[in-house]
Image: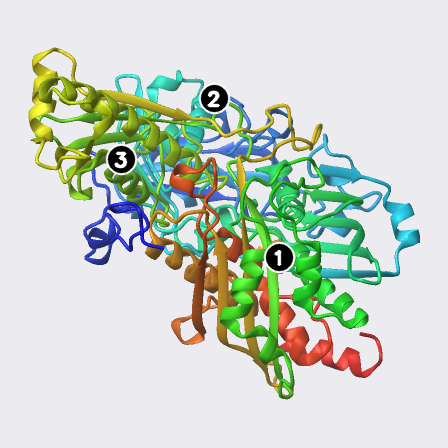
Amino acid sequence: MENEYTILGERMKRTDSLAKVTGAATFTADIKLPRMLSAKVLRSPHAHARILNIDTGRAEKLPGVKAVVTAADAHGVKWGVFKYTQDHPMLAMDKVRYIGEDVAGVAAVDEETALRALDLITVEYEPLPAVFNPDDAMAEGAPLIHEEYANNINIHVHIDVGDVDAAFNQAHLVREDTFEAAGEAYSTLEPYAVVASYANGFLDLWMPNAGPHVRAKALSNMLKMPLNKVRVRHINVGGHFGARSEVSPGDLVAALLSIKTGRPVKLALTREENAACTRQIHDIKATIKTGVKKDGTITAKDFRVTYDGGAYSSTGPIATSIPYYVYEEAYRFPNVRYNGYRVITNKGIRGMYGAHGRAFLCGNEVQLDMIAQELGMDPMEIRLKNGLKVGEETATKSVIISGGLEAPIRQAAEKARWAKKRIGLPEGEGIGMGCVAIMCGFPMGFRSGSTCYVKINDDGQATIVSGIVDTGMGNESMAVQIASEVLGIPPEDINLVNADTEVTNLDPGAYSQAASFVGGNAVKRACEEAKRQILTLAAAKMDHAMEDLTIKDRTIVSRTDPSKRMPLRWVVREAFFKGEPIAATGAYMPKISFDREWIKNPQGQMAGTYSFGCSIAEVTVDRETGKICIPRFTAAHDCGNPINTMAVEGQIEGSIQQAGVAVLTEENRWSDGWLLNPDLLEYKVPLACDMPEIDTVIVRSNDPEGPFGAKEGGLTTRMNAYSAVACAAHSALGVPLKQLPLTPDRVLKALDKAKGGDA
């Protein structure tokens, strides 16, 4: 079908590409301000200890040291995404709860002096018993890390729909399996850095972040400053993946030091600090029980999942819920019970992740293959039979308004030649399929919506002002492309001002998959209103019906008589003469249930819409060494109607690397609370030589609510790529791999276990 739009759906070069590939783009650590100080942080050497005393006197007297801060300099306000999870003081107060926790901050004239000052701070600790995994933490008599969490259970998400026990009793086949996955590192190329500059009662901040408005509000609360005096400014972000979704301890440390000195302060973490002392990813253990009919119809699901939450709550209720929700959004569950437990341990802080839920999602898909095998079914057919369709509801009462699982499955299978390749695979080769769905814009209170301003300048060019954040996926380009399509001017005529809390209005940020669906809608509506104003004035000047006018190539032109035309800049200047400049506002709030709550009321419309995806991995496994290779990978992603097809393809390809290939290597390794692989030498990220041949398939479902029919672009692949690899490995070996990542030692262990008859 020929593209009905001028620029939408094209393979447009991103607006930030040139600056990034030439090294001209500025990141937080690049910022240099007059009189700027260097900051360093004193960190806990204990996994769990009571703080008896902190003596900063010697450090404060060191020449070149301008300030030292501890929790005594803060206001005792604790961070947590929800009121009932506010337990993280950012600077340790009464206790330290993980190795590397922030205890004190120093600002000095240079980094060397700041490091010397750290050695002069004396902290008296009383070591306490520590626990390092959820099973030990939940055991009776285990030491409490926070007094308010009985058995160290931070969050319990309970969902119970239908009659699960009766459905199991009536099922033809019931299977129960347990899967485990190690936590991972975000491995962002940019280590965390923050610059704070306080002057005249105003605090300016730069840091890699995915939600400036959320960050500014959190710091406003912790610093007890008015919100309009805490400004988070725009800066390029060198990687996100969920890591930059929340406020960081470093933000508070740098802010306090700048307030205390009245000078700009830069805190740049080392690679090791970035890995051990900022948010990382939950370890997960999932026990999955599934009942089916003879024809493969799922009749019942029962889940018990534990998440290693580290020392503090973070996004606890969300992190404990999302793996389940992205699965119930894909499949039909008439009877389902989910018990998710986020458990506090004496390990580093944890957060959200673009590929969250590895053991749970992998486990479900591998188990589905095992069930299909027992029933004599094609794994594709059991997924098609149970996949949700348009008009159906999820188990927790969200309606699917576009897409569905069938199209991605069929298109991926056709591209990968699934039917042919499954038959007669040589020993050691396998092919597997993973499916999932993703919500677009889940409830974040009044921050669920986005607002955009647009003004048309006197030369006919435009400036759009939006809270949209770009953490690497192309959201800024997306906004410019939407504005270009609506306003009829080329992208180079559009300037974007974004991600600055004092200039832009509320926006969810690069979080909850809301940028295209929510932020893009706001941009579209603002530009449509500006276009209406332009055409109203042009109709009067041209003495022509407004309904017959449009804007193309910087020109107002008649649809029926192209000879009737007028330069856009003429109309804009006329508007200025009239004292009615072309300026417009557009806003969008997704149609979601605002009484839905992660713990108390997990029912109702969770998101404005959902995207769907299917990944197919082909693997080879060496039974002698246990090494898995991925020669080919196919991913089909339903993004509604793509704004920029090249950007969607890039997101799919990046997701295959981050999740599909990473499932072979990536894991954090621990010993008594110490992270053993905090650098990119010992933490094994996939390299270019590990990448498979990739086929990307964009599935078009033209969402009725999305801007020009668009939805999020790419995250389904990030959430199902590792499932596809795990299923392919099961296909190749004939035994399930229940521990992730799929390293050679685990492959060999599973094979040995199968030989002993204990598969």
Looking at the rendered image, the disc whose residue lies closer to the viewer, 2 or 1, is: 1
Callout 3, which amino acid? Val
Q: Mark 2 packing: few (<14 Cα in 10 Å), some, or many (20+)?
A: some
Q: Which residue is mark 3?
A: 486
Q: Which residue is mark 1?
A: 358
User: Considering only vertical position in the picture, is 619 above or below 445?
Assistant: below
User: Considering only vertical position in the picture, is 459 above or below 633?
Assistant: above
Q: Which residue is mark 2?
A: 221
Disc 2 is placed on an element classified as helix
Q: Mark 1 packing: few (<14 Cα in 10 Å), some, or many (20+)?
A: many
Disc 1 is placed on an element classified as helix
User: Considering only vertical position in the picture, is 366 above or below 565?
Assistant: below
* Residues at marks 2 and 1 touching, judged by CB atoms closer than 8 Å: no
Residue at the outermost front position: 560
Callout 2, which amino acid? Asn
As drawn, is 357 to the left or to the right of 269? right
Callout 1, which amino acid? Arg
**Residue drawn 50% across and 36% down?**
441
As drawn, is 15 to the left or to the right of 178? left
Q: CA distance from mark 3 to mark 2?
A: 39 Å
Q: Horizontal and vertical percent for residue 502? A: 31, 23
Q: Horizontal and vertical percent for residue 526? A: 31, 26
Q: Horizontal and vertical percent for residue 291? A: 83, 56
| Relative depth, front residue between 77 and 527 | 527
Looking at the rendered image, the disc whose residue lies closer to the viewer, 3 or 2, is: 3
Q: CA distance from mark 3 to mark 1?
A: 40 Å
